[in-house]
Image (spheres, rainbow, N blue to C red):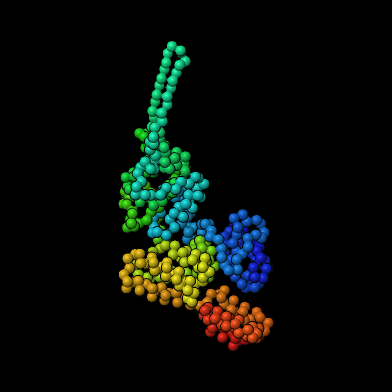
Amino acid sequence: MATKLTQSCPWCNKDVVVELGRPRLYACPFCKKNFTFTPSVTQPEGKSAVPSPEGGTAISSRFVETPSLKELVDRTLAYIQEGLHVHLCGPAGSGKTTLALHVAQQLGRPVVLIHGDDEMGTSDLVGRDSGFKRSYLHDEYVHSVLKVEEEVKPVWVGRALSEACKKGSTVVYDEFARSRPEANNVLLSVLEERVLPLRGENIPVDANFRIIFTSNPNDYAGCHGVQDALLDRMVTIHLSGFDQDTEIAITQERSGLPLADVERIIAVVRAFRCEGIKSSGASVRPSILISRILRVRAGHAYVEDPVFIQACRDVLLSQSRRNGASPQENQQNEEILLRQIQEHCSSPLPTEQHTLKAAIHEREPDNLMVELGEDKEVQELLLRKIREKGLAGKLLNELLKG
């Protein structure tokens, strides 16, 4: 259960109940304005970190656990604790490595991360002889006898897999299909017979040793075919992407963007993913990239925000182009993207609407122009800002109501 504490609203300075766990967007029950609370690394009891009225937060690496992710974590953890070996297979950006590391940490044992590579051999997993050690003995204990001995031995240097097998660590073998099949042959006896063949000996594998594999599908560039004998020794879980609520939670956690913006970004990305030609698959990374761009450039998920439009073009259209789309498909993709942005992001965000109402109703004079006085420069600046935000029609309606 998340720890609760109170934090002063940056707008009205009244105490609001917040959660200690992670950065979140809150609505003040008193002034009705939004702010983002960012907990510090060492959060004391009571009040601490300063919330940001603009919604900017530091990026957190905390694992997001929605109901669907919790079910997946619990299932994977149950397999691992039973002594089975799990293989997480899915497209790029589907969260394989993050999930594997999170499950490995739940076991409470040291975690070793190995990255698969085409140049990797068996010796890179278990170790090899590296150099020689020379010992020299010059014995003159008896003055009339001289004894000289010299011995040269190879020096064995262990690698991650052999050390983990001996110490009972948890191994996360990331992208293991990028290593050549012959390099992974040593794993056959490790997974089945629980012994590590090493330098002509069979080294018993510690009872606490566990291993989690991750890989992309075989049609990805740089992936080798995995031998059936190895796949038969593990439980393969296919990851095909997250549900919408999980994508929203992950994106907000990784970017620190307000929830209202993140929901719109996810809606646009998911719609473009379904309709766009040769667009990205199940990856949540495009949503995170767009959200981080908006955070650092103070943009909003709004159709009239040029920062948002350009961020969507840079991230989503570039991904479709690198997948081999033709010029006609590129043009069609851009039209699809702009249509989806218009459909999901055409109305001003709630924070912008509240700012507009505050500018109109929270002033004592009934007439906004009377409050501004005769200063033409200020009036022109206000009208220009209203036109840039696309709020002219809304402002007129509010003034007529007033």
**Rendered image quadrant of residue 371:** bottom right
Report the residue that reaches farthest toward the top: 144
| Quadrant assignment for the C terminus | bottom right
Find residue 9 and report its horizontal and vertical position in percent. Answer: 65, 67
Q: Nearer the viewer, residue 85 or 56?
A: 56
Q: Is residue 359 left or right of residue 99?
A: right
Give the residue drawn at x 62%, y 78%. 358
Q: Is residue 57 at least partly visible in the picture?
A: yes
Q: Is residue 233 above or below residue 216?
A: above
**Along the line of sight, the residue nearer the viewer: 376 or 355:** 376
The reply to whether residue 165 is in sight is no
Residue 205 spot, x, y in % from top left: 42, 39
Image point 35% across, 67% down: which residue? 321
| Numbered-mark total | 0
Residue extending farthest bottom = 400
- Residue 331 versus residue 253 in the image, above or below: below
Question: Which residue is rendered at x = 35% and y = 44% of the image?
Answer: 121
Residue 115 in the image: state x and y as whole percent: 40, 49
> Residue 8 occupies which quadrant of the picture?
bottom right
Please tell me which residue lies in front, 184 or 355: 355
Image coords of residue 176 (percent x, y): 38, 50
